[in-house]
Image: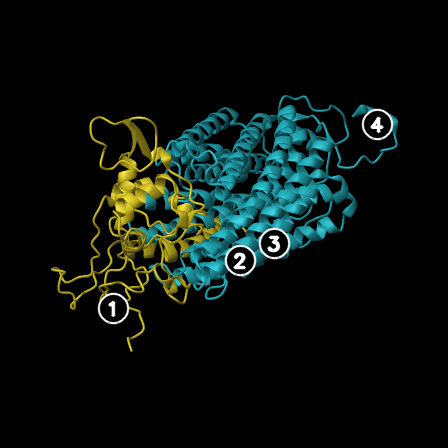
Chain colours: A yellow, B cyan
Amino acid sequence: MSFRTFILALTASFGIAWLAIIVIPFFKMRDLAPIAYPEAKTVTAGVFFPKRTGRVVNGARVYAENGCYICHTQLVRPTYAGNDLYRPDWGGLKMDPDRGDTRRETNAFDFNGEKFAQIGLMRIGPDLSNVGRRVETAEASSANPTAWLMAHLYNPRNDPQSWNSKCPPHRFLFEKQEIKGYRSPDALAVDVGENMEMVPGPDAKALVSYLLSLKKDHPVPAALNFAPPEE
Amino acid sequence: MSSDTPISTAQDALTRSGIDRSLRHPVMFFLMSGSAWLAISMLLGLISSVKIHNPDFMSDCATMSLGRVYAAHVNTLVYGWGMQAAFAMILWLMARLSGKECSMIGSILTAGHLWNIGIAIGVVGILAGFGTGMPWMEFPPFAWPVLLVAYAVIVIGSFIQFRVRPEGGAMISQWYLLAAMIWFPWVYLTANILLHCIPGHPVMAAGINAWFKSGMVFLFFTPVALGTVYYITPKVTGLPIFSNQLAKIGFWSLAIIAPWAGMQKLAGAPIPIFLPYVGGAATALIFIPACAAAVNNLRSILANRETLALSPALRFTFAGLISLVILVICGVFLNLPNSTLKASQFSMAGYSAEILAMYGFFSFVIFGAAYFIVPRVTRREWLSRRLIRWHFLFSVYGIITVAAVALIGGYLQGTDQENWELPWMTAAQTGAAYAVAITFAWCMILLSNFFFFIHLTLMWLRLGRRGPNPTLLTNPHAADALDSAAH
């Protein structure tokens, strides 16, 4: 076999796969056709566009830099690929006070505003696709969800319910400062010494804002709704 | 491809020792800096493993937080050790097989330093909190062009050597190495350009990242290791390659199958639905090329059991091939869409497969080749058979623990995750229990690499034993007092 044949065969065997599973899908997915959303009354444009509020870009950066994706996934798989949807609070809420069962699988529009979808590596911790919704309704129903998440990042084992959590604490995202006059409204309920308080740093604020923006349970248009018909 | 070995003459021996002498500095540079990175990576792996079951360990230090340490551990393993060990293999094997002396030592060493500086800054970047958050590509974005340029300078000479080699035929080793030299820049450039330079869909970006990881393993580290095995086995056993037909089948099936693998990690994600299925099928089918190459070499090794008992090179190669077979069997049974993939997709099983590929298979083959190559380029023999034996035993027991525990534990963890009626904490607990065993295994592997690093440093300093006889695993003249006194 000549060198030229070898290189050609190598280029062909790699290049076909490269075109078929990388280049063409990449450029096809760059601009997905918007999905019409006739039944929604609140969406002015009439297309499905899950709105996210919060510091998505900054928070996603903090999430990536600190390797949250190693233990946490952000993917609620359809039932053919996994049982994530059956969990009562992963794909949405089984019993949302206003909307009933809001659970649904992750779709391609859920990562709007992010550069890289943090699908995740291992589920050492729970899936975070709807962590914002979960924290607002369950863990912190009576308290401030931001404060609950801050306290959780500071010490994940603070809450007696999660005494056995394997989540590492992220105390380095917080700053210790002297109390001047009133306590800061953001200060954590931890004792850090006489006349001192612990307040979230900029990265902690961005991260918590991002985590609270993770609410991937917007009602989907019929074309994206794979839920079984209601009986 | 020619199977007939050239008749050894005095002229050939001179040529070979000339080639070895010309390559002393590049080969030793890449092996030394690679094994230093390996030791760092093992240390970081140990820290991150401890943190998985004991989260308060060193948790006040941002640099040492789990997310950063784990990323640094994987990236030093891949780019610090894996790539540099592969450079050493490519440089030496291509020069030997093409019969050409290395004439670009200055530029190779310069590029080698550039590579190491790039990695050092990249690792500091990850630990300082500037990682990109894309698995296996966590170095801050400035690093990849630096590494790619350094790579091109390092391997270009080997490419030219192949083109100007005297005979027309090429050995199967050269096929594998040449293919790896072409596949790596293609995979690396594609992934980095599409993820860093061209804004695309975030989920497709994650898919390309999964493909990149698989491509690094099966299109670079696997062919480099198989090219090395196809050289070491015939050399040490003295037998020709068992079947040239099988070797060709193994090579071309790898070339056809491996580029499709990887995206099964995105099963259920909103990307075109054929991608995860194709990825799962391809990953399972890699069984064919891997087994073709493994059987081909294992036949020669097992036909020569006395040499297997004596030669460190052959014993490490043998263990590496067994790891490869285990890896591809796991590849078949853990990647079946709609059955096992559900449980293995987000469990520790994926990490253990990476470690099995990078350490159990690739690194073992490289260690074996290093025990063969280093005495030839330094013209000294290995000092201590005990250090070699310890290196082997601790590495083998370590990798068996990682593989067994993480695969079984990962699978059980995944099954618990899938059992949605169990509270989430149950699945988390299942995984954490096995993580303790992985920490133990990292301790053993770290220790074994400490032995290797010390031994290699002594060889690098040319403090090796002078003498005509190679250092073997068991002393054939153990009763001979004179001989044992000489050690």
Seen as rendered, the residue at the extreme bottom is: A231
What amino acid is found at the position of numbered circle 4 in the picture?
Asp
Nearer-N-terminus badge (4/3): 3
Provide the chain ID for the residue under circle 1: A
Q: Is residue B280 visible?
A: no
Secondary structure at badge 3 equals helix
**Image mark for residue B412:** 2
Among the 4 quarters of the image, the one containing residue B275 = bottom left
Q: Disc 1 marks which residue?
A: A223
Q: Which residue bears the numbered disc 3?
A: B326
In the rendered image, residue B9, in percent from the top left (x then y), is placed at: 73, 34
On screen, residue A181 above or below B74: above
Nearest to viewer (mark 4 / mark 3): 3
How would you rate the neighbour count of disc 4 (Cα within 10 Å): few for under 14, some for 14-19, many for 20 or more? few
Looking at this rendering, what residue extends furthest in the front direction? A194
Cα distance in 3D space between marks 4 and 1: 80 Å
Residue count near mark 2 (Cα–Cα under 10 Å), binned few <14, some 14–19, many ≥20 = many
Using the image, tell me which numbered label, if any, was put on residue B352.
Answer: none
Residue A187 in sight in this render: yes
